[in-house]
Amino acid sequence: MILPLCNFLVSFTFCLSIHRTVPIPSLRHGIAGSTPKSHILVQGPLNAVISSNIHYALISSDIIDRVNAHLEEQAVRYTKKLLKNYVIRKINNAIGSIKAKFTSIRQKIAGIYNNALENRKKAVTSRHPLRHAKWTINCRYNSNYSDRSTDVEEIQFFEDGSLITSSGITGNFCFCLLMFTGYWYSDFGDITWKIPSKDGTFTYYNAQICWNSCGPFAFMRRGVIFKDRSPNGWIPTYLFRPVIGKFTAQGTE
């Protein structure tokens, strides 16, 4: 691009020098349109110089167009490359995030599975009929039969069928000829025990026990509390025992 520009400047300077040395045709040489021979001889080189300059100008314009097209092409390629790198980086980040979450979930599942195996091992090796000797009982009483709406009691169950509460009250399991399978179980997986009252009646606790082999503690559900009727009434104490509350329980040791 620099060489054509230099040629153009040299040619332009040459034209100015010719214009200064060659006289300009005027009317004193004759009628307009009649030019001396010397002038006609000078016009030949001048036209050649002008044509050469126009040629170089056209070549320079073509080179500029090509350079601009090349720059535009390079800009498009660079933009595509940047866009491709951006998309690849985003995809890699998403894949890395998915892998990290998958690893975290897999570790959590492995931890839960290992804990379940450990809990099952403890449950299977436990020799107590209820898996735990000590339990926490959460009671909810009906307002018609008790002044307290809730009560939490710690009970220790012994293998011989007896029990003792945290307040020092003793009790024992309820024997049933039709559904008895052990000291603490019936055929349907229920457990029932009774605690004596001061008036000679008993309060009964019945619930379904879940061994929960894969969990850390066994628990009781659907617990029902009912008691004998008053001995001063005309109905026997064991007939139509009223339900006075509900409870849930969970083993602790």
Image (cartoon, rainbow, N blue to C red):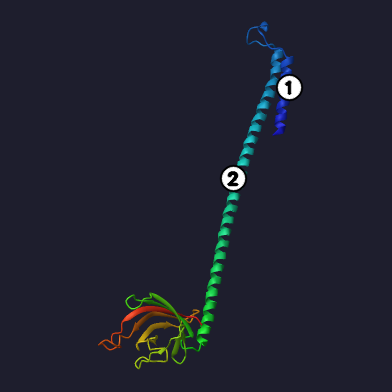
Instruction: Decide: few, some or many residues near mark 2? Use Cα within 10 Å; few <14, some 14-19, many ≥20.
Output: few
Task: Tell me if 143 is positioned left or right of 83 in this view.
Answer: left
Question: Which of label 2 and label 1 is nearer to you?
Answer: 2
Q: Secondary structure at mark 2?
A: helix
Task: Tell me if 139 is positioned left or right of 61 in this view.
Answer: left
Q: Secondary structure at mark 1?
A: helix
Name the residue at 58% across, 59% down. 93
Instruction: Say which of 52 and 224 sits in front.
Output: 224
Residue 39 position in % (x across, y down): 70, 14
Name the residue at 38% across, 84% down. 205
Query: Does residue 209 lie above or below 66 as drawn?
Result: below
Name the residue at 57% across, 54% down. 87
Q: Quadrant of residue 30?
A: top right
Residue 73 position in % (x across, y down): 60, 43
Residue 9 position in % (x across, y down): 72, 26
Q: Amino acid at mark 1?
A: Phe
Task: Find residue 14 and name its label.
Answer: 1
Name the residue at 57% across, 56% down. 90
Q: Amino acid at mark 2?
A: Val
Q: Quadrant of residue 94?
A: bottom right
Query: Does residue 41 lie above or below 233 as drawn?
Result: above
Task: Find residue 32 and name its label.
Answer: none
- Earlier in the chain: of badge 2 and badge 1, it is 1
Instruction: Decide: few, some or many residues near mark 1? Use Cα within 10 Å; few <14, some 14-19, many ≥20.
Output: some
- The residue tagged 2 is 76
Query: Does residue 89 lie above or below 17 as drawn?
Result: below
Q: Quadrant of residue 180?
A: bottom left
Task: Tell me if 50 is positioned left or right of 166 in this view.
Answer: right
Residue placed furthest toward the left? 234
**Disc 2 + disc 1, Cβ < 8 Å:** no
